[in-house]
Every structure is written in C-alpha cells, then in structure tokens.
Amino acid sequence: MASLIDILGSSFIGGLLLLLLLKLNLFANSSGVTSDNELKLLQNAKTLAEIINYDFRKIGYEFDSTAIAIADSNHIKFYADIDKNNTVDTLEYYSSDTTVATGTENPRDIILYRKYNGVAMGGPTLGLTKFKLSYLDEFNVVTNVLANIKYVKVELWVESTIREMESNFVNPNHPYLFTYWEMKINPRNI
C-alpha cells in the first residue's frame, strides 16, 4: 500500500513538472511571436516615415512659385523636381478609408497613396491606421495659407496587422500593438 501511495505521489509531482514545462514552452513561444510583431510594427512605422521624409524634404525643389497646391489634414499635393531631370514633377499623398485595405486582420488599416505625376501607387498598408498632416509657418504657428507654409508636421498611427496572442497584457477591446510616429519636416526650398 505504501508503494502505491509513493507511485501516485511521484506521478502527481511528475505531472505538475510536466505541466510547468509545457507552460514555460507556451510562454516562450508567445513571447517570441510578440517580440516579432513589435519588431515588424517598428520597421513598418520607420519605413513609412523614411519614405515620407524623403519626398517631403524635396517640396519646392527647382520650382519657383508656390510649391504646395493642396494642404489638407490627410492630403498634400506639391511640386518639385523629384528625380532631378530638370522637369517639375507633381507629387501627392493621401490616404484611403478602412474599406480599401482588405489584406490584413486589423479592421482599422488604411492605405497611403503616393501619386507621382498623375500615377497613383498604393502600397501595402504596413499597419497604418491614421495619417494626419498639419502645416506651420516660420513661427511654428499652424497655418492654412499655402504661401506661408514652412514646415509640415506628419503624424502616423501604425498598428500591427495581426491580432496579438492572448496574454495578460493584451486589451481585449484593442488586441493590436500600436505605435505613434511624429515628425516635423522642414523643406529647404519653400
């Protein structure tokens, strides 16, 4: 009888150890997936910021008149010699609504369009959920007068394109990782 109790006790303790190992393995996998999602999120935000920063710094390059034609909160159109071929190019940025981006799990994703000389190119969503522009004059005061714009402030809200794994840190009402990127760009040619 004593050996039966010993066998049951050791089986119980072995089962607990096995469950602890399984839980540790699940936690390690979940942490790896979360870490990968965070890395993708930051890379996507950085990619969007680099593309926008590159183009917006060229606003007015080799153009003598008012370089900005449209300046809305989510739409900008400007003139510049982007490809340095001595002809003025037209570049436009605007965002879609949430119904256009269908390739991701996140229902709030939008697509940022880049229209170059009349040809619209919408890339992948990269998790962009909000794109906001504001325009500042030489004294850093918000302005709507096209001729007074000296700085363009860009705000990007980027979320992960897939749901976060179940964990204690995930908000059930908002199961997507997110980041916010803000930059103030000073185009040298306006």
Image: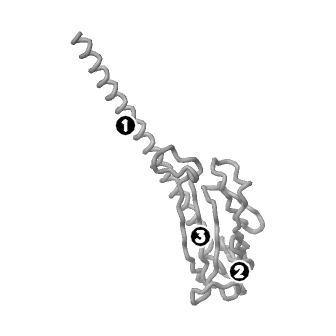
Earlier in the chain: of badge 3 and badge 2, it is 2
Q: Residue furthest left?
A: 2
Q: Nearer the viewer, mark 2 or mark 1?
A: 1
Q: Which mark is residue 155?
A: 3
Identify which amino acid the numbered label 3 is placed on: Glu
Secondary element at image label 2: strand
- For residue 67, side relative to residue 174 (left or right): right
Identify which amino acid the numbered label 1 is placed on: Leu
In the rendered image of this protein, does residue 110 appear above or below residue 12? below
In the rendered image of this protein, does residue 156 appear above or below residue 185? above
Rounded to the nearest angstrom, the CA distance separating label 3 from label 1 is 39 Å
1 or 144: which is nearer to us? 1
**Image position, residue 155 (x, y; %):** 59, 70
**Image position, residue 74 (x, y; %):** 69, 70
**Which residue carries the number 2 mark?**
68
Identify which amino acid the numbered label 2 is placed on: Ile
Asked if the residues shown at circle 2 and circle 1 are in contact, with their CB atoms under 8 angstroms apart, the answer is: no
**Which residue carries the number 1 mark?**
24
Rounded to the nearest angstrom, the CA distance separating label 2 from label 1 is 56 Å
Asked if the residues shown at circle 3 and circle 1 are in contact, with their CB atoms under 8 angstroms apart, the answer is: no
